[in-house]
Amino acid sequence: MKKVVLAYSGGLDTSVAIKWLKDRGYEVIAYMADVGQEKTTTAAIARAKKAGAAKVVVRDLKKKFVTDYIWPALKAGAVYEGRYTLATALSRPLIAAEQVAVAHAQNATAVAHGCTGKGNDQVRFEVTVQILDSALEILAPVREWEFKSRQDEIRYAQRHGIPIEVSKKSPFSIDKNIWGVSIEAGVLEDPNTEPPADAFQWTRGAQTRNLKEAVIEIEFFKGVPVGLNGKKMEAIKLITALNELGSRYGIGRMDMIENRLVGIKSRETYEAPAATILIQAHKDLEALVLDRELLHYKEGVAQKYAELVYYGLWFTPLRSALDAFVRTTQEKVTGTTRMKLRKYSAYVVGRTSPYSRYNESLATYTVKDKFDQRLAKGFIDLWALPYKR
Ligand code: ARG
């Protein structure tokens, strides 16, 4: 029998997909990747077995996700179309790469995913699989099957004894991991409808919460966050702590119209408290230690990097080359950024680094001034020279 490794989330689509693949003659291995999505795996494993999975494989990818995907993106300053901090997009190449490894370990000849034919995620999964092992067959049941609606799928699940979680069924499509939450569909499909309070998964309570201003300090070493409020902290703990704190303040909400790779404009709402805080803190520290030309050049790299991530081109030569560039830019991005948190916003109020290029005796307007203002005249004359008439 042909073996397929299905990227299984525990939700309705991929639960139904198990049975659907089995009916098409495959032995199904349900593969669950833990990227910090806070799902209860026990119920999901039971559901996979009920649906007919021969085996369930669970992989904890959180550490790898942070070290090999999130930190490089943070160092690059990657943000898509000015706002999306790429939580979903960054997780896909990792989940797919590990899926290929599981397929090899299990002697499977096929992989499958539960993405629709309209989104970016199908592209990210399949491009990654094709790059890493083009011999694997790729199956996309949701793109092919006959179900027209969620109701159709529920009926099919009930008919085949697949337990479904009706209780916490959300009217939204939600993708969650340690770097943020992506929320779409339901009433959000009207771009002019304000996201209702219950659309938010992490920051919901902020609206009515009485909040005092908070001050936090984030320490970086070579572009990587290593400490919070004067204490060294391990990566996952640090991100989790900032997500919890930031969520209380409602920080990192984004509501945007974005351009999908497949040409559709879509309305997506995001929550990314830790990502929002860290990207801002990191960028501010860079402004202190990098010279002007490097800083400006790097802004272009950040945009390109974000596009590569968004477009599913993680495992490509350009991404590796940009990573190498970014790595050298981070040599001196060591120091501390101090931020204030208020309801719905986080902003920088101070920064310090042993590699600071800020020179107070040049910038000052007091008697401590060391800048020779007479030199400015000659500089300006030469600067204007090519254009003068
Ligand atoms: N628009 C985001 C992206 O393409 C998120 C996609 C998944 N969103 C969701 N709500 N299921 O990266």
Image (cartoon, rainbow, N blue to C red):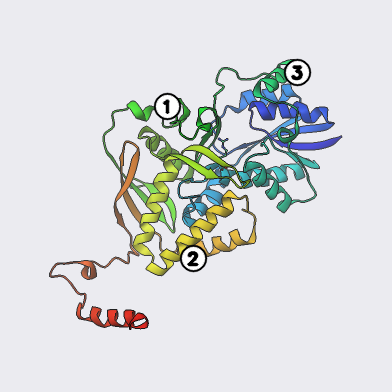
Q: Residue at x 57, y 49 (%)?
A: 310
Please name the amino acid that badge 2 sits on.
Thr
Q: Which part of the image, by quadrant, shows the N terminus?
A: top right
Near-viewer residue (143 or 191) = 191
Q: CA distance from mark 2 to mark 1?
A: 43 Å
Q: Quadrant of ligand 1?
A: top right
Disc 1 crowd rating (10 Å Cα; few below 14, some 14-19, many 20+) is few
Q: Quadrant of residue 20?
A: top right
Near-viewer residue (182 or 325) = 182
Please name the amino acid that badge 1 sits on.
Ala
Helix, strand or loop at label 2? It is helix
Helix, strand or loop at label 3? It is loop
Q: Residue at x 63, y 47 (%)?
A: 93
Q: Indicate left or right for 296 with 68 as reference.
A: left
On residue 197, the disc is 1
Measuring from the top left, give residue 11's x and y in whole percent.
63, 27
**Residue at mark 2:** 328
- Callout in the foreground (1, 3): 1
Q: Residue at x 23, y 67 (%)?
A: 363
On residue 160, the disc is 3
